[in-house]
Image (spheres, rainbow, N blue to C red):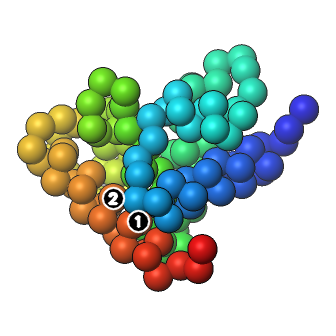
Amino acid sequence: MVDDDALLARLRGELESCAQTGRTVTYAELAERSNFPPPHRIHRMTEMLETMMREDHAAGRPLLASLVVSRTGPLPQRGYFDLLRTLSRYDGPDSGPEAAAAHQRELSAVLAAAEGAPC
């Protein structure tokens, strides 16, 4: 059984790879790419992404989890925006132009940081 720290490191590594290529990834794609184990893999992975967001925020880093988007649209799920509000990084709705602008701001920060990172 893989421990949570190892799973979190695996997720972070996959997201750093996505950032280097400038590509977003869906929740299901990330679960597959990171070989995230069942049961309830998407739910558990989402909880870990939220942990990663808190860690990145506390460390003053761009939010790597901003690379993860819904398969039904170009934005993350509602929980992403809930946590952005909790972290005082956004104060708006879960969808629509305001949400898209907030997500784009966070995503741009991730991609800009990746440009300066070694491959």
Instruction: Name the residue tied to disc 2.
Output: 107
In the image, residue 39 lies at what x, y percent? Answer: 71, 17
The residue lying toward the viewer, choosing from 13 and 53, is 13
Q: Residues within 10 Å of mark 2 (few under 14, many from 20)?
A: many
Q: 12 left or right of 96?
A: right
* Residue pictured at 34% horizontal, 51% vertical: 84
The residue lying toward the viewer, choosing from 29 and 38, is 29
Q: Say how many tags the image has.
A: 2
* Residue pictured at 38% horizontal, 66% vertical: 111
Above or below 1: residue 64? below
Residue sitting farthest toward the right: 1
Secondary structure of residue under mark 1: helix
Q: Type of residue at label 1? A: Val
Instruction: Name the residue tied to disc 1.
Output: 110
* Residue pictured at 22% horizontal, 36% vertical: 94
* Residue pictured at 73% horizontal, 20% vertical: 38
Q: CA distance from mark 1 to mark 2?
A: 5 Å
Instruction: Let me know if residue 18 appears in the view.
Output: yes
Instruction: Let me know if residue 53 appears in the view.
Output: no
Q: 17 left or right of 24?
A: right
In the image, residue 61 lies at what x, y percent? Answer: 48, 72
Secondary structure of residue under mark 2: helix
In the image, residue 101 lies at what x, y percent? Answer: 16, 53
The residue lying toward the viewer, choosing from 63 and 69, is 69
Viewport quadrant of the C terminus:
bottom right
Q: 64 left or right of 85?
A: right
Viewport quadrant of the N terminus:
top right
Q: Type of residue at label 2? A: Leu
In the image, residue 106 lies at what x, y percent? Answer: 32, 60
Residue sitting farthest toward the top: 39
* Dot 1 and dot 2 residues touching (CB under 8 Å): yes
